[in-house]
Amino acid sequence: MRKILISACLLGDRVRYDGGHSLLDHPIIARWRREGRLVALCPETAGGLPTPRAAAEIHQRFPILVRSRSGDDVTPAFLDGAERALEAARREGCICALMKANSPSCSNSRVYDGNFNNTLTEGPGLAAAELMRHGIPVFDETQLAELIDFIDSQEVRAA
């Protein structure tokens, strides 16, 4: 069975910075959950950050710097969470990930620009970047059709 690493908030776990969730209520997600395909993880809490916590954004890419809204350097927790996401994906044999869009950890394509002004900029979050760097495709909740096609194509190849 092909497993998928998934941001825990998308399954309704209250692990977002604000103590909320981003439940993705979709029949395919419910089916994959029943089948035991989903490996839930929040990189930020896995990296040691509490819930709730101050919002954080990637302030700079080189060298990497992630700051909370209150100005704290939370880079070590984000890097640790990224490593833990990769470890979980490898341990569980995940062939891809479904992660939260626009997250400084989970987004596969765009994150907030580090100024806390709701401006998005191109680039992945830290955990998504780590997964992709190691060959694990990352989709976000706006790419569910693409994810389903990817899973279907992997199952055809395995058959």
Image (cartoon, helix red, strand yellow):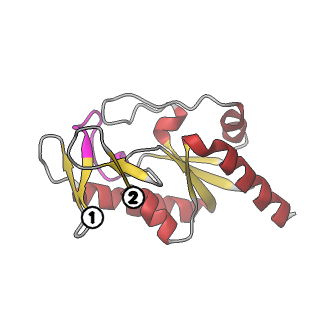
The residue type indicated by label 1 comes to Arg
The residue closer to the viewer here, 35 or 62, is: 62
Q: Magenta segment range?
A: 43-56
Furthest-right residue in view? 159
Q: In the rendered view, would you say 120 is above or below 83?
A: above
> In x, y percent, where is residue 42?
42, 46
Residue 52 on the magenta span: yes
The residue closer to the viewer here, 39 or 123, is: 123
Provide the residue designation for mark 1: 61
Name the quarter where the C terminus is drawn. bottom right
> In the rendered structure, which disc, 1 or 2, sits on the residue that comes first in sequence?
1
Q: Under tag 2, what secondary structure?
A: loop
Provide the residue designation for mark 2: 123
The residue closer to the viewer here, 39 or 122, is: 122
> In x, y percent, where is residue 148?
71, 47
Q: Give the residue at x 36% y 56%.
A: 81
Name the quarter where the N terminus is drawn. bottom right
Q: In the rendered view, would you say 146 is above or below 27?
A: below
Report how far apart the C-alphas of labels 1 and 2 lie in the structure: 9 Å
Asked if the residues shown at circle 1 and circle 2 are in contact, with their CB atoms under 8 angstroms apart, the answer is: yes
Q: Would residue 110 be seen by someone viewing this image from the given angle? A: yes
Q: Would residue 104 be seen by someone viewing this image from the given angle? A: no
Q: Identify the main secondary structure in magenta.
A: loop
> In x, y percent, where is residue 30?
68, 33
